[in-house]
Image (cartoon, helix red, strand yellow):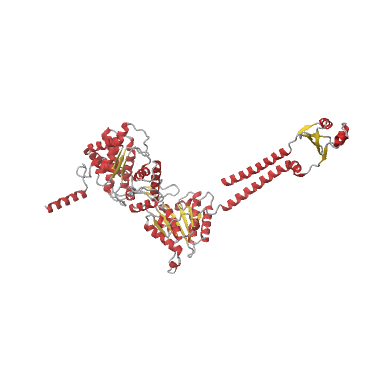
Amino acid sequence: MKKNVLKNFLIFFAIFFAVAIIFSSMGKMNKEPQKMTIGELVNNIKQGKISEVVVKGDTINVTLANDEKRVVKKESGESLSQTLNNLGVSSGKISKINISVQDKSGFKYWASTLLPYLLPFLLIGVLIYFMFRSIQGANSKAMMFGQSQAKQVDKSQQKQKVTFKNVAGSEESKQELGEVVEFLKNPKKFQKLGARIPKGFLLLGSPGTGKTLMARAVSGEAEAPFFHLSGSEFVEMFVGVGASRVRDLFKRAKKNTPCIIFIDEIDAVARKRGAGLGGSHDEREQTLNQILAEMDGFDPETNIIVIAATNRPDVLDPALLRPGRFDRQVIVEEPDINEREGILKVHIKKKPLSKKVNFRKVAERTPGFSGADLANLLNEAAILAARNNQATIGMKNIFDSIEKVMMGPERRSRIMSEKEKKITAYHEGGHALVARFMPHTDPVQKVSIITRGKAGGYTLKLPTEDKKMYPRSEFIDELAVLLAGYVSEKKTFGEVTTGATYDLRRATSLARSLITDYGMSEKLGPRTFGSNQDMVFLGKEIHEEKDYSEKTSQLIDEEVSDFIQNAVDKARGLLNNKQELLKKIADELLGKETLEKERFEEIVGKKKTEATGVKESEKTKEAKKKEEGKKKRKS
């Protein structure tokens, strides 16, 4: 639309510019010389100062002996010679002058005569032309409104071809999607055995795990046309447009078989039907119905594969997931440590890298990072290196970028009073000390009182290995770590500050999840409480079905308080026994602002469980008994 407006503006500007030039030239053509009266003409003729006279109708153009031009107006219907004779000019004087008579003719005459009348009509005609042209353009756009907005990428248009080599990790997903490539390249291999080519593949995974990249890799491997669009591009405010676009999309795809249709964020149009309140949601349902009908109407021999992606499989309509539509569901999970290392090596290409960079250590420090997070991490590291005028990206750049991605940029310019620094030092020291001596917590990598994002300071803990399952003991110890800052503040200064707000919120949420989601409450037993019902129109989080009584609700609240209080007691007991270590950590933080893992372990020593001041777990006791038994047998 903006391009058309700019184009029309330029055309009108060019027209008016041309008109201005014409009028300017006409002004120059019609610029008259200095006027002269008949009497002055007669006197100049008598004195011999006239060299040439040109008569054009009632206008006499006079050229003086000094080549100056003059214009004289005479009476109409009377010749120049008769006028001069009447004024007493002798024929001898007249014969000495070069007199010529010309009729008005040529382009200048007609232009000066007709153009003032024709120009308004020409401008009106041009205006009417552009008005009709705009109306025709609007009509053509209205006819194209129901056409698909899918972007088609052919083999010849792929500037940077993406294949499975460009996708690190997700080996099972690549193996599953590798069948798509075989279906498209050699369909007869499967048809001979009576195998039906799957029509749809649904990629499920968290945001940033590489679902779109995986679909592009399938297209690159198969060397097939690739139709890419988002689910939201189907839906418009006009009823029937989405369904029309679906029909047009599949019509285009059938003309380009074998091909791949990739629909990103399909949950925008494929949510569960029947929960809407009318309006645009009805349009979404019609679009979904058309998608289902088109997938059912596929010719068994038509080589069209539909790949869709979503991170909300819980809201999809069941009809979309049945066999015959999206036959395969491929889960694209967050990468493990080995896959993160491979992803980092893929994204570091074309970036100058220091030889000291160890991607294994970077992968260990980035648990839970998706492929997009890792790409962003290396980009931030490159920006940081450029800001420091470095020629290569170093390990420190990457580690600093990890903290920036996780917690936000450093805010060294923020002015903190000495009292606030001291409170922050003891707060973070409490977190770090309890995390160090709890038997089931992740090791501390870094402690800092430098402000990052909204946090006044932070304690960085990272697991030594990737985990899929978490035992109850880890959650209990994690609660103690979360509340250690609160306890440390209260113990040292006699009161708490707002700095513990986020920790308290996280601890309360974790305690409630232990009871209602994980069934880890000994008092309430192995069951869950409450179930979220997917209200598609209103949103998932708004409506929750309460499948327990008010009495049970009170018990849940009491159990949450018990979990929190036990964690506070555990943290307080440990900090009471480690008061000197806490003071050393706080003093070190006040002096240096940051403690790395090596320096932190120099202060607190190796991990021990004997002097923690808390009860040991049954597993720890059994391990000690076995050690004592071994020593006795050896003796």
Instruction: From this view, report whether residue 332 is shown above or below residue 503.
Output: below
**In this orientation, which residue lies closer to the viewer: 59 or 61?**
61
**In this orientation, which residue lies closer to the viewer: 191 or 314?**
191
**In this orientation, which residue lies closer to the viewer: 274 or 39?**
39
Q: Is residue 567 visible?
A: no
Q: Position of residue 197 (x, y in %)?
A: 44, 64
Q: Report the residue that reaches farthest toward the bottom.
A: 192
Q: Quadrant of residue 79?
A: top right
Instruction: From this view, report whether residue 458 is shown above or below residue 536.
Output: above
Instruction: From this view, report whether residue 260 is shown above or below residue 520.
Output: below
Q: For this view, does 227 lie left or right of residue 549?
A: right
Q: Is residue 440 visible?
A: yes
**In this orientation, which residue lies closer to the viewer: 87 or 123?**
87
Q: Position of residue 236 (x, y in %)?
A: 52, 50
How many numbered discs? 0
Q: Report the residue that reaches farthest toward the left.
A: 635
Q: Position of residue 614 (x, y in %)?
A: 21, 43
Q: Position of residue 550 (x, y in %)?
A: 33, 44
Q: For this view, does 365 lie left or right of residue 271?
A: left
